[in-house]
Image (tube, helix red, strand yellow):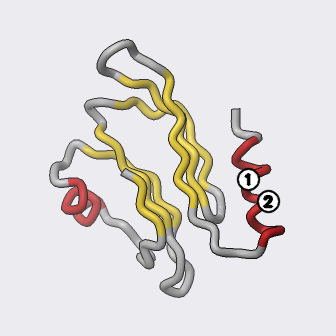
Amino acid sequence: MCLQETKCLDFSREKVCLLWGTNEVEWVENKAINSAGGVLTMWSNKSFQLSRFVNGRNYIVLEEFWKRGNGAHVTIVNIYCSGSLREKKEMWNMVGGFR
């Protein structure tokens, strides 16, 4: 699950489990700044195994392996960018370079 504009300065395990519905959850967060922005990406720890991640200013990129089914390699990108065109281009260049 990918959430943007969370406006949250901190996500405790309790908050994330409440949002997810169970405690079988892992997450990466990008905290809001002065109650603006914020990105949260959550996934089932029974379904996915995190391989690596990049936590940028307005984005999170996750590489995971799907534990169920065929064990596929999965990339999840969660982006929030309300800046200028220049800032958006810079952000996409950084995200595009993640391999």
Q: Residue at x 50, y 70 (%)?
A: 38
**Which residue matches tag 1?**
92
Q: Is residue 66 left or right of residue 58?
A: left
Badge 1: few (under 14), some or many (20 or more) residues near its Cα, within 10 Å? Answer: few
Name the residue type under label 1: Trp
Question: Which of the two residues, 70 or 25, is positioned nearer the viewer here?
Answer: 70
Q: Is residue 15 left or right of residue 38?
A: left
* Residue 92 place in picture, x, y as percent: 73, 53
Q: Residue at x 51, y 75 (%)?
A: 32
Q: Is residue 94 left or right of residue 8?
A: right
Q: Residue at x 78, y 68 (%)?
A: 87
Work out which quarter of the rendered image holds the C terminus and state it: top right
Q: Residue at x 19, y 48 (%)?
A: 23
Q: CA gap, disc 1 to disc 2?
A: 5 Å
* Residue 91 place in picture, x, y as percent: 73, 58
* Badge 1 element: helix
Badge 2: few (under 14), some or many (20 or more) residues near its Cα, within 10 Å? Answer: few
* Badge 2 element: helix
Name the residue type under label 2: Lys
Decide: marks 1, 2 in contact (CB < 8 A)? yes
Residue furthest front in the image: 85
Q: Is residue 62 above or below residue 22?
A: above
Residue furthest top in the image: 70
Mark number, residue 48 = none
* Residue 81 place in picture, x, y as percent: 63, 68
Number of numbered discs: 2
* Residue 34 place in picture, x, y as percent: 54, 87
**Which residue matches tag 2?**
89
Q: Which picture quadrant has residue 56? A: bottom right
